[in-house]
Amino acid sequence: MKSITFTLFTFQCIERFEKNGRFSTAHLYKCALHSFSLFLKKASISFLDLTRDCLKAYEQWLEDQGKLPNTISTYLRMLRSIYNKGIDHGLAPYKRRLFHNVYTGVDIRHKKSLDRNDIHTLLYKDPGSETLRKTQLAARLSYQLCGMPFVDLTHIKKSDIEGDTLEYRRMKTGTTVRVRLLPQTVETIHYLKKKMAGKGTTREKSPTLLHLFHCDHSFRSLKGYIEYQTALRQFNAHLGRLSKKLRIQKHITSYTLRHSWATAAKYTGAPIEMISELLGHKSIKTTQIYLAAFDDNELAKVNQRVYNYTEEYL
C-alpha cells in the first residue's frame, strides 16, 4: 500500500476537481478537510485516523458546534468520498461499514419551502425599495421558471430561448430542461433586463448571455465560479432583507424558491415525474428530497375524503 496522507490526497483531489471546472465540489472538499482538521487538531491527517469511534466523535462535535443535520451529513459524505477514492488508489485500508454509524442522509424534516401566503408576499408585495424590487423580480423569475437554480439563471443564453420556449442544460447535472414561457415570465424577463440596463457596462461581457445578473463568464472557469459565488451571496443577502422588509418570519435563500415551487406543484396535483423533469433532476429520489411533507391537516383531509367515499358507497 502506497504511503500518502489523507490530507495530501485530498489536496490532490481538489486540484483535479478545479482543473475539470468542478469548483463547487472542490470547495466542499476543502470545507470538510478544514473542519475535520480542526476537530482532530492536526494539520496532517492519516487515513488511519478514520475510525468508527473517531467519526462518531466528530459527528457529535459538529452537533455541539450547532451544525444542522444536512451540514453534518455533507461533511461526512465528503470524508467518505475521499476515503473511498483512497481505497480505489490503494492508499487506504478497507474498513467495512466505516461510515455506517454516522449520519450521511438528507434531513427532509428541515422544511425549506414557503407556504402559499408567504411565497405570494415575497414575489408580489411592494417592498418600497428599488434594490429590493430587483431582488424580487429575480426571485419571481426563478419561481416562474419552475424553480430554476440561481446558477442557471446567471447563465441563460439568448439562443436558449426560441419563440415561447426556453431550453437549457443545467450547470450542475447537464440535464436538458424545457420550459414553456408564460406571458408573465416574458414580462418579468423584460422588467429585469430593464432594471439591469447600464449596470457594469465597463466590464467584459459574453455576447451570448442575457446578463440578467452580474455574471459574465462560464461557471466552469475559476473566474466565473468566483463571480457566481459573489452574485449568489449578494442575492441571498438581498433576499434576507426582502423577507425582513415584508415581515416573512422564515430564513430564505435562492433554494427556498426552488423547494417552494416543487411543493406548490405537488399540492396542485402534478405527478412527481413531471415535477422531476421540470426541476431538471436525474432521479425522482432527488425530487422527493425537495418536496415538503404534507402537514397533518392536509393528510387528515385526504383521509376524510377516503372515508366519505367509502361511506357513500355503503
Image: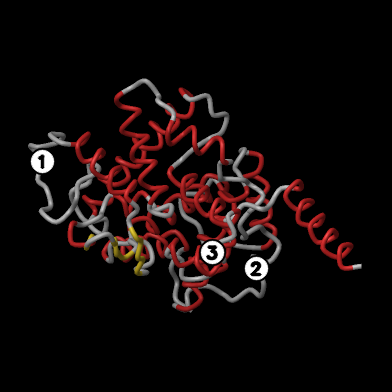
- Nearest to the eye among marks 1 and 2: give it: 1
Check disc 3 and report the residue beneath it: 286
Whichever of labels 1 and 2 marks the residue nearer the N terminus, that label is 2
263 sits to left or right of 227: right
Secondary structure of the residue carrying tag 2 is loop
What amino acid is at disc 1?
Answer: Arg
Check disc 2 and report the residue beneath it: 98
At horizontal 61% and vertical 60% (from top left) the residue drawn is: 104
At horizontal 51% and vertical 39% (from top left) the residue drawn is: 119
Label 1: few (<14), some (14–19) or many (≥20) C-alpha neighbours in 10 Å: few
101 sits to left or right of 261: right
Position of the C terminus, as image quadrant, is bottom right
The answer to whether the residue labelled 1 contacts the one labelled 2, judged by CB atoms less than 8 Å apart, is no
Q: CA distance from mark 3 to mark 2?
A: 25 Å
Check disc 1 and report the residue beneath it: 203
The answer to which of 303 and 134 lies nearer the viewer is: 303
Label 3: few (<14), some (14–19) or many (≥20) C-alpha neighbours in 10 Å: few
- Nearest to the eye among marks 3 and 2: give it: 3
The answer to whether the residue labelled 3 contacts the one labelled 2, judged by CB atoms less than 8 Å apart, is no
> What number is the disc on residue 13?
none
The answer to which of 101 and 279 lies nearer the viewer is: 279
Q: Quadrant of residue 308?
A: bottom right
228 sits to left or right of 111: left
Whichever of labels 1 and 3 marks the residue nearer the N terminus, that label is 1
For the view shown, which residue lies furthest in the right direction?
314
Q: CA distance from mark 1 to mark 2?
A: 50 Å
Secondary structure of the residue carrying tag 1 is loop
What amino acid is at disc 3?
Answer: Thr
Secondary structure of the residue carrying tag 3 is helix
Residue 15 spot, x, y in % from top left? 31, 62
- Nearest to the eye among marks 1 and 3: give it: 3
